[in-house]
Amino acid sequence: MKQIYFDNTATSFPKPPGVIEAINHYLMNIGANPGRGGHKAAIGAGQIVFNTRKKLAKMFGLENPMHVIFGYNATDTLNLAMKGVVKQGDHVITSSMEHNSVIRPLNELKSSGIITLSIVHAKADGVVDVNDIEREITDKTTTFVFNHVSNVCSCEQRISEIGALAKKHNLILIVDGAQSAGVVPLNVNKANISLYAFTGHKSLFGPQGVGGLLIADDFDYKRIKPLKQGGTGSLSDQTVQPGFLPDCFESGTMNIAGIAGLSAGLDFINETGLENIYQHEKNLLKYFVESAKSNVKGFQTVGYTDKSINVCSFFIKGISVSELAQVLSEKYAISCRQGLHCAPLAHQTLGTFPNGTCRFGFNIFNTKDEIDKATMALAEISKKINTKTL
Amino acid sequence: MSRQIILFYSTNQAMWAADVLKESDIKHKMIPVPRELSSDCGYCVEFFDKSKEHIDDLLINNNVEFDTIIKL
């Protein structure tokens, strides 16, 4: 039975063929380390890295490609952003829809006595009211940290309004773009985002192990303290870390094969069209929810509205989400993720803690035919629950 | 004829400079940094047929950060 892959929120699959070809080409024909030698292969590797910076800068509206910093994933660069900018005594504001990639580092900073933290509660649809954020601002507030799109229900925060609020109060806005990069068109500068963390392996179609941080053109990068020091291939005669971009934040050999794959993923997005990707995924989500509501007894969505983008959290009355995911996998070859999705606060907000939900995350490669098969599977499971034959 | 070479603090900036020169149709090539110029382990950009002043302005206008332009 052919696998139906609906776990794109965790990581996208399949990857476009160009991504695999680009990784293969780098490993087979280039293989060198950029900046660690002047030979042709090192220059070739450097060109891959630079071209990828340039593509990312263009996609997110940055003028300076040196403001694109590579890391390993969104968690990695969220840690750099948050721990890099806060100072002793700062007050930080975040939301109740955050992934553990945001809330765990913030709680660590809080328990270490470095920051105080306010968590603004989102409404029932998962979206935070900007007025509620403004009410939390004190004279100690320096930083906002908000996710752009939820990994639990794909609601989109009003990030431009939050950006305008940050600008009004002269605050740093850090955005977790793990779920939005490659789906939601965004201009980092125009949205008044200071720092935008992304991962390469989700909707940007790269492999695992590459991500990054985008620094707004007008944001003074020296406000971010590097968390790591080491070899950069630059100023090798000096024993202290270089102070310039991007080297100050990129110590150690990077995941060049991953960056090569990410670069091809960006090409795929540009060829397909970001708007087309967004619309395709939104259409599939709507199609699935309407179809499941009509055909699956006891089907209940969580946090779904007509503004949800590409993820549906749901459960079926009478069966645990873990058993549901197991049956879907073993009997129907449908891959999805059950549980709390590393976002306990979001599930508390949506009223599904601690049981969690079953999550379908769609991408550009999914089809209505796959959704029809999944809906039929859910209908069959639901029928068996009701006749106690599961 | 003397050679003209742009030196950088960062090989990432060297890549960017090469890209700016390419987009401006200026003949150039990336080469290892001559040992007598720097103890750095990366590369630099040699350019042809343009004046030092022209390249200086072009890079500054594009916000490319570089160390210096040297004539050998």
Image: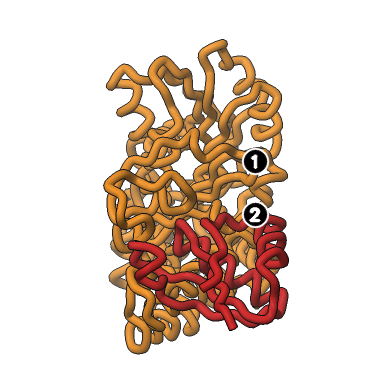
Chain colours: A orange, B red
Neighbor class of circle 1 (other Cα within 10 Å; few <14, some 14-19, many 20+) is few
Q: Is residue A155 above or below residue A32?
A: above
SS state under label 2: loop
Q: What residue type is labelled 2?
A: Asn
Label 1 vs label 2, nearer the camera: 2
User: Which circle marks residue B4 in the picture?
Assistant: none
Q: How many marks?
A: 2
Residue sitting at the far front: B1
Can residue A14 be seen from the camera position used here? no
Q: Name the residue under label 1.
A: A218
Gap between marks 1 and 2, in whole Å? 13 Å
Dividing the picture into quarters, in which one does residue A14 lie?
bottom left
Report x, y in % for residue A191. Answer: 69, 42
Chain at numbered mark 1: A
Dividing the picture into quarters, in which one does residue A207 lie?
bottom left
Report x, y in % for residue A307. Answer: 67, 48
Instruction: From the viewer's side, name the closer residue of A11 and A28.
Output: A28
Q: Which residue is drawn at 57% across and 34% down?
A: A173
Report x, y in % for residue A168. Answer: 70, 24
Report x, y in % for residue A26. Answer: 38, 82
Q: Residue at x 44, y 69 (%)?
A: A206
Q: Which amino acid does label 1 sit on?
A: Asp
Q: In this view, does A61 lie above or below A262?
A: above
Q: Name the residue under label 2.
A: B63
Instruction: From the viewer's side, name the closer residue of B67 and B63.
Output: B67
Q: Residue at x 59, y 30 (%)?
A: A123
Chain at numbered mark 2: B
SS state under label 1: loop
Dividing the picture into quarters, in which one does residue A135 lie?
top right
A156 left or right, relative to A99: right
Q: Which residue is drawn at 53% across and 18% down?
A: A141
Quadrant location of the C terminus of chain A in the rendered image: bottom left
